[in-house]
Image (cartoon, helix red, strand yellow):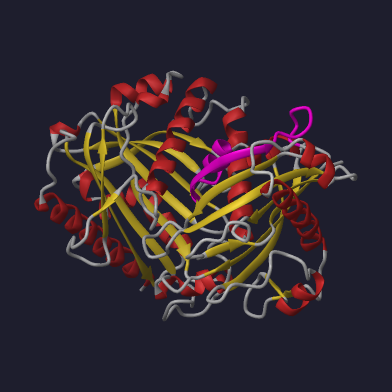
Amino acid sequence: MFGAGELLRSVSGQPEIEKPMVIELAVAAMEELVRMAQIGEPLWVPGLDNPMEILSEEEYVRTFPRGIGPRPFGLKSEASRETAVVIMNRINLVEILMDVNQWSTVFSGIVSRAMTLEVLSTGVAGNYNGALQVMTAEFQVPSPLVPTRESYFVRYCKQHADGTWAVVDVSLDSLRPSPVLRCRRRPSGCLIQEMPNGYSKVTWVEHVEVDDRAVHNIYRLLVNSGLAFGAKRWVATLDRQCERLASVMASNIPAGDIGVITSQEGRKSMLKLAERMVISFCSGVSASTAHTWTTLSGSGAEDVRVMTRKSIDDPGRPPGIVLSAATSFWLPVPPKRVFDFLRDENSRNEWDILSNGGVVQEMAHIANGRDHGNCVSLLRVNSSNSNQSNMLILQESCTDTWGSFVIYAPVDIVAMNVVLNGGDPDYVALLPSGFAILPDSPATANNGGAITEVGTGGSLLTVAFQILVDSVPTAKLSLGSVATVNSLIACTVDRIKAAVSGENA
């Protein structure tokens, strides 16, 4: 067991003045997280029109008087809690949370970038008990209309006497004040209890103070409810990713179905390629402060965000100038219907301008979750245009209780054959495009009435394209190519609106 004294002896690298303060903060945060995860009313009260619990501010201040100090002026509090049982043992879960690369991969839809700045303690005997690290991360919603949230915090992992593991984050901004504080993490994280069968029961608490004034109106209900960045989203993502990882490991694939990839090496390679495609899509769609993209101002339509990236010496991307364009809008149609429409190859020619009205057929697929909407597919476009005869589309569709994605990229037929035979997927050049589909409010999930305005059961849809506009990385970007991508997005949006609203009628 770790108290402040034992931790201090295993800490190195921080200025003397900060070490004891960081440790004291981490130990207090751990105690707070455990209690926040276990106490019910009056600390947590059931929401009125919202299926989530709400934190009582007064009760919180009474229960935890020490904390990291009063809420800074201009920030509002956002707190949520969620519990679920996931298909993964606690050792692997702890490793995912404590390894920044695994953490940002598993939660790529939420974590747009993350870095471990300093490892203050590696914990005992390589099992992370007592591990302490200073980190920075940026959290996102897949839309250019919701600013990302940056956080600078310490993460502390501990195994408790009853065998439960806990991982807690707490902001370090109080020790190193920044002039502009837009987001501060109060003790947040999760408790992990081992279940019989190798599963784990996870209780997640997400508690932040944030300035969300720059959020666009159509996303305001989702963000204000705590659903956009809250515990329910972390747990839903973790649950789906655990299923996905289990499907990578699966060896008992029935060979009867047409198009099912049964070779374990082929499945592994294809799922790894699809995972990279999803990460690349997410990194190009949110209003991130990361400077891997250059944002173009005055790109015409002000609700379309256009960015460029030069791609040089990256085997996973075609060389040249890549243009990424993204926009978000509201649809008076339930999220499930939008998801089913966009992932179905039979309705693809209703919106996909690039498939040129050709017939799209699924050639192969890998199911990777309980919901049959969770799947990686290889599609062939049978186009009358002979130039596209060797064009395949890799697509991943995924859905959980929080939201859904349909992400796809044209892929080379020769490269895909290598992947299907278990070859290295890192050398397949990908430029993903696709969709993120979110409910317009927490009430959407159980709303049966008419959809008349934001918050009455509709969807928030983000459409994003990444397109190679010049294969010479040093070329100057032409305004013509920006206009082309803008009109491609506008036309796709119009087609989707017409198609799903027509169905709605």
Q: Position of residue 198 (x, y in %)?
A: 77, 36
- Which residue is painted at 42% across and 64% down in the image? 146
Disc tally is 0
Q: Where is residue 358 in the image (x, y as percent from the top left)?
A: 22, 43
Residue sitting nearer the eye, 177 or 420: 177
Q: Where is residue 440 in the image (x, y as percent from the top left)?
A: 47, 70
**Image side of residue 188 versus residue 293, left or right:** right
Residue 66 visible in the current orientation: yes
Where 250 falls versus 441 (above or below)? above
* Residue 449 inside the magenta-drawn segment: no
| Residues shaded magenta | 100-128
**Image side of residue 282 versus residue 71, left or right:** left
**Image side of residue 35 versus residue 393, left or right:** right
Residue 161 found in image quarter: top right
Residue 426 found in image quarter: top left
**Image side of residue 237 versus residue 327, left or right:** right
- Which residue is painted at 56% across and 76% down in the image? 73
* Residue 124 inside the magenta-drawn segment: yes
Where 474 falls versus 446 (above or below)? above
Q: Quadrant of the N terminus?
A: top right
Residue sitting nearer the eye, 441 or 496: 441
- Which residue is painted at 41% across and 73% down in the image? 218
Where 118 falls versus 262 (above or below)? below
Where 138 falls versus 133 (above or below)? below
Q: Position of residue 193 (x, y in %)?
A: 80, 46
- Which residue is painted at 42% across and 80% down in the image? 453
